[in-house]
Image (cartoon, grey):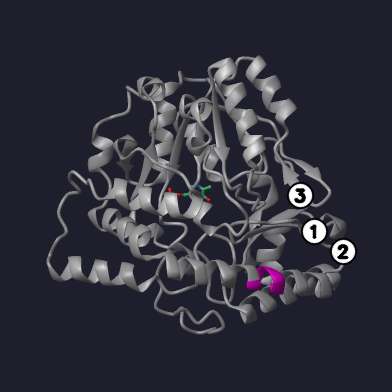
Amino acid sequence: MQDPNNFTNFANRSSSKWRRFPEEVLPMHVAEMDFDVAKPIRDRLSQMVANSDLGYQGPFPEIGPAFGGFALNRWGWKVEPGGIKLASDVAAAAVEILKAVTTPGEKVLINSPVYTAFFGWLKEAECEPVDAPLQLDGDTWKLDLAAIREQFENGVKVYLLCSPQNPVGRIHSAQELTEIALMAQEFDVLVISDEIHAPLSWGPFTPYLSLGQHAIETGVTITSSSKGWNTAGLKAGFLITQSDQVRNKLSRLPDAMQWRSSILGAHAMVAAYESGTPWLDETVIILQENLEHLRHEVATRLPRAKMFQMEATYLAWIDLEAYRISDLAKTILSEAKVSVIAGPDHSPQDDFKGFIRFNFASSKPRITEAVRRISELCEG
Ligand SMILES: Cc1ncc(COP(=O)(O)O)c(C=O)c1O
């Protein structure tokens, strides 16, 4: 399939990753992979283009069995297919849900460091983030259940959970998620579980809604195949509810959501879930190899940097605090010509000034070169 060590086969890509910065900059920022898209997806798209099958996205019964089959095989999760509703992407699903269940100025719980767009989604829905930051336990970032409980006690009614967590690559344990579901039920909180990175897990991932009645009655999952199979530009995602309690809470969701998703994206999701598992398995192995490679390069070239336990995603959270570089990500971009995401962008309080998020879904030579450039800046 993909040739992850090929340095030069990216010239024909026109996505934001390749256009945002001049060619001299190594793009290790946005969450796209430098790998070829899986053949079953490419074939399905080619067929649709050949058939001029490019109209509006209509009723789509295929998504339930396709995702249901994948979820059952991968995670042992039995999904009731009637609870799936398409959206144009995960961001759109999140914003529509937030708008449907909150009033302007309402507080929504997040756990920093978290995917930077969460803050944009909250702003768009006129909500305020309230933070229960992850806690570092040894070299593992974990949810702070006591802090989460405190926010529920304070009256927060909506929790935007990132599972697995971008950027730290942590899979929240079944035990932690069960505890959250119990607390959510106790305090009548809606948990919006963003599980877009779940297919890219090498540890045991637990879908929130697979955890039984407490979770089913408190949770809505938002996801897509677009992250796992690298098709963000196709614009399709979906939300999953499995109970009338949650569906009632979401009754203000606009019907038009379904029709705003792309027909190409919708069919690509079905191709991914039905026929994309061999490609995904191969990709998850490459990501683990790349992570080992990155750890080795960082340990060798940036001995004062810290990396953490990861079980999912291709987004490494790297602590460069010891190098005391001001405006870290900007300086890395301007001096080292590597684009990374700045630590403080992952926090409502601008914490994590010494951290960067580094995308390692690339070729090993590209990873080496990026680390070499950063080390030249940091180590001199
Ligand atoms: C946690 C998380 N949620 C959502 C998205 C974006 O999803 P979409 O492109 O479907 O809006 C990303 C993209 O990186 C992400 O990391």
Q: CA distance from mark 2 to mark 1?
A: 7 Å
Q: Identify the image quadrant of residue 315.
A: bottom right
Residue beneath disc 1:
320
Q: Look at the picture and state if 256 lies above or below 43.
A: above
* Foreground of the two, 25 or 161: 161
Residue beneath disc 3:
140
Image location of residue 283, percent across then percent down? 52, 69
Q: Residue at x 64, y 72 (%)?
A: 290
Q: Look at the picture and state if 131 lies above or below 231.
A: above
Dot 1 or dot 3: first in sequence order is 3
In the image: residue 141, left or right of residue 204? right
Kindly indicate whether the residue at mark 3 contacts the one at mark 1 (C-beta within 8 angstroms): no
In the image: residue 242, left or right of residue 270? right
Q: CA distance from mark 1 to mark 3?
A: 17 Å
Q: Identify the image quadrant of residue 130.
A: top right
Residue beneath disc 2:
304
Residue type at tag 1? Leu
Disc 3 is placed on an element classified as strand
Q: Residue at x 32, y 23 (%)?
A: 252
In the image: residue 105, left or right of residue 113? left
Residue type at tag 2? Arg
Kindly indicate whether the residue at mark 1 contacts the one at mark 2 (C-beta within 8 angstroms): yes
Dot 2 or dot 3: first in sequence order is 3
Disc 1 is placed on an element classified as loop
